[in-house]
Image (cartoon, rainbow, N blue to C red):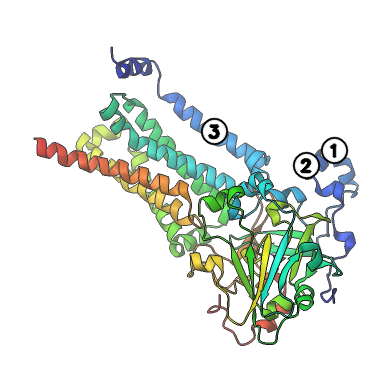
Amino acid sequence: MAYRWKNTLTHADITPKAAYLNRRQILAGTAGLGAIGLVPRGADAQTGLAPNTLEEIRSYNNFYEFGTGKGDPAANAHQLVTSPWSIKVDGMVDRPGDYALGDLLAGLTVEDRIYRFRCVEAWSMVIPWNGIELADILNKVGVQSGARYVAFETVVQPENMIGVQRRVLDFPYIEGLRLDEAMHPLTIMATGIYGEPIANQNGAPIRLVVPWKYGFKSIKSIVRITLTDQEPPISWNIANAREYGFYSNVNPNVDHPRWSQATERRIGGGLFAARQDTLMFNGYPEVAPLYEGMDLSVFI
Amino acid sequence: MTLSATINGALRKFPAWPLYISAAAYTAWEFWRAVTQQGPYLVEPINVLERTYGEIALILLVAGLLVTPLRQWTGVNLIKFRRAIGLCAFFFVLAHFLVFAVLDVQSLGRVWTETVKRPYVTVGMLAFVLLIPLAVTSNNLAIRKMGAAAWRQLHKLSYVAVILGVLHYLWLSRGFQVEPLIYLVLSIGLVALRYRHVTWRRQAA
């Protein structure tokens, strides 16, 4: 059952390919068109959600399997082997197994979702994903009644991953959601950006996107989905429990020990870009009921 | 003539002032690349510029600590360049701080909050503050006025500043990263050498 979340943006807000491929080409080549308002640059100012260019989305990444520099994933992720790809579905499900990616997604609807994406490092982008609601995938494999959490695992290809060789984190990268978070219509598994297959550095061939949580929760290049009744461990919490909690909801009122989370810098504004206020739940207040009665300064 | 003597002879022809010009030109060049978003500055120029200035500062600070051991071990004497190395290091720390204050956090209030609340900013700021008296006294007049012994004593603060600078880098890195650890080993090693050397001389005397 797709389309349970209504985008306030429509297909017309997605920047046409000619425009997103390289903004500087546009600046150079169509400066005149811009002056008469013909350069399409995503959504207008009233929504404030102008998607970043594909070039920006593909060249500024955190994917520690491929190195810790922001440019490392773009430089190294071509080594990731994404075909064939299968996902192991196990734990408390009715139909566990190793699913070929195509089989797991067959018959499900791919939607356009333009989401804000907020990194825990206090930068952000707007990304036009193409993805499938995670709930649809989970319903397809059949979640058993006792399950309360979903755990995810990123592929490990040591010979192709410089960051794995250097043991930057305790790989494989693992993440998790509470079942109700996973079933929320905002939560998707993305397979594309701007209508193109997702680039390796962005988490090919399939990744999680949870737009109201810090970016590291949106685990990339997933090879395993496990339904469980226990809160699963997550990589950054294992690495540094004081700094990274299981929930990691975007919250301007709770600072990361090393960064203020009150403001953020939207990528694409250049050297003199002003910071902007970070929104509670990254501007998705519809998820607030999931956390009713929870002290979000404790459950970070 | 030994190799070190040959090198020293060749170095004698080179004045130190081009180092200042190079540092200023490099600072301006990187700033220009950040403004026009070239190369590594394409997507997030603020953070990259901040890191670029910070890293070059760290490299120069460590290089400054290398001058004396290099002379002791190899006889190659770079002492006449050391003031320039140190002052350029300070300029890059200053540039790093300005990018942080003006372009990154964008308000004095936030500079203060960050300094008080974030240990890695605290140690970085402390290193910056410690370097100020060293930069101010990096001239012949100050040495004359203070006397060589007091001047040398004061400039031992550089040991503390370098290690705090490395700590700052180590602390802001996420996960297990190699580069900050290399700086840590280098800086602690180079400072420790000073003290080992002192004890050794005392025993010999």
Q: Which residue is mark 3?
A: B26
CA separation, marks 2 and 3?
25 Å
- Give a yes or no on whether discs 1 and 3 share a subunit: no
Decide which of B115, B49 is in the foreground and name it.
B49
Image point (77%, 73%), residue name: A137
Q: Residues within 10 Å of mark 3 (few under 14, many from 20)?
A: some
| Quadrant of the drawing holding the C terminus of chain A | bottom right
x then y, percent, for residue B82 = 35, 31
Q: Amino acid at mark 2?
A: Arg
Image point (77%, 42%), residue name: A24
- Return the chain for callout 2: A
Q: Is residue B14 left or right of residue A298?
A: left
Counting residues from the start of the chain, the first of labels 2 and 1 encountered is 2
Q: Is residue A265 above or below residue B54?
A: below
x then y, percent, for residue B23 = 49, 32
Q: Which residue is mark 1?
A: A29
- Give a yes or no on whether discs 2 and 1 share a subunit: yes
x then y, percent, for residue B51 = 53, 46
Q: Is residue A236 left or right of residue A83?
A: left
Q: Amino acid at mark 3?
A: Tyr
Q: Based on the displayed image, in which of its 4 quarters is residue B120 positioned? A: bottom left
Decide which of A201, A257 is in the foreground and name it.
A201
Q: Residues within 10 Å of mark 2 (few under 14, many from 20)?
A: few
Q: Are marks 2 and 3 in contact (CB under 8 Å)?
A: no
- Give a yes or no on whether discs 2 and 3 share a subunit: no
Secondary structure type for disc 3? helix
Image point (73%, 78%), residue name: A183
Q: Which residue is mark 2?
A: A24
